[in-house]
Image: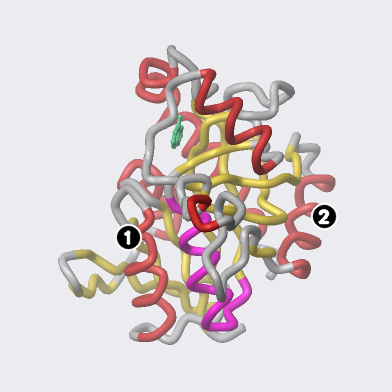
Amino acid sequence: MTKLAIMGAMQEEIDPLLEFFKEYKVVEYADNKYYETSYKGLDIVIAHSKIGKVFSSLTASTMIQKFSCDTLLFSGVAGAVNPNLNIGDMVIATQLCQHDLDITAFGHPNGYVPGGKVLVDSSKELLKIAKEVAQKNNLKVIEGIIATGDQFVHSNERKDFIEKTFNADALEMEGGSVAVVCDALNVPFFILRAISDSANGEANFDFDEFLHSSAKISSDYLVKIIDEL
Ligand code: ADE
């Protein structure tokens, strides 16, 4: 690895990382800020994309193609789908999908477009390192499928559809699109999320209450992983 990209979707998701790394060169590009820093001999670029699949694809491609990042790590929050996940628990994605990608009218499965994949695999090597770090630090982290869509999910009905259709453990709004970009550009990636809500009728209240604390849980773990890269 020569240059590491670290992404979040919201400013609140990268703030704890910016506080940790402290000093940056800020580069403005495509109506966004990219924070360049170095840590233990590693060059790092940090950015929040803004919410959703379009902005996160733009940011991931920019970090890879303009800033020459060759590994991408994502840190942020997610809604729980798996009932064993509570607020503050962490999920690392083994695979990601787009739950709102729908051309089923033409006989394709949910989440599929011809030439694409329903599920994109994250880097096995990065997952291995993440699991070792979790074990060493006694952290509760589950591996699972993360489903992404351009929707803040706040109903059991939609959540049940996502669980049944994709066997998802957690859902959010950026990981699946970042995964597609990294997969196409052959860049190993890893998506980490800490649970902020249960994607049910109370999700918007829980999200507001737990965004900061869960973003910090995710970023603290991410820093421990970076120490082992
Ligand atoms: N990120 C965190 N919680 C979420 C939810 N309920 N829906 C979509 N993205 C989320």
For badge 1, the amino acid type reads: Val
Q: Secondary structure at mark 1?
A: helix
Instruction: Decide which of 88, 102 is in the foreground and name it.
Output: 102
The percent coordinates of residue 215 (x first, y second) are 47, 38
Q: Which residue is mark 1?
A: 54
Can I make out residue 41 in this image? Answer: no
Looking at the picture, does residue 26 appear above or below residue 185?
above
Residue at the spot x=35%, y=50% of the render?
Answer: 52
The percent coordinates of residue 192 (x first, y second) are 59, 49
In the figure, is residue 78 to the left or right of 29?
Answer: right
Residue at the spot x=30%, y=47% of the render?
Answer: 11
Q: In which quadrant is the N terminus drawn? A: bottom right
Q: Which residue is mark 2?
A: 132
Instruction: Give the residues in magenta.
Output: 174-188
Report if the beta carbon of the residue with label 2 is closer than 8 angstroms to ligand 1. Answer: no
Q: Which tag, 2 or 1, sits closer to the chain's start?
A: 1
For badge 2, the amino acid type reads: Glu
Query: Badge 2, how many Cα within 10 Å: few under 14, some, many 20+?
Result: some
Q: Residue pushed farthest front?
A: 106
Instruction: Decide which of 142, 114 is in the foreground and name it.
Output: 114
Instruction: Decide which of 47, 223 is in the foreground and name it.
Output: 47
Q: Secondary structure at mark 2?
A: helix
Residue at the spot x=79%, y=52% of the render?
Answer: 131
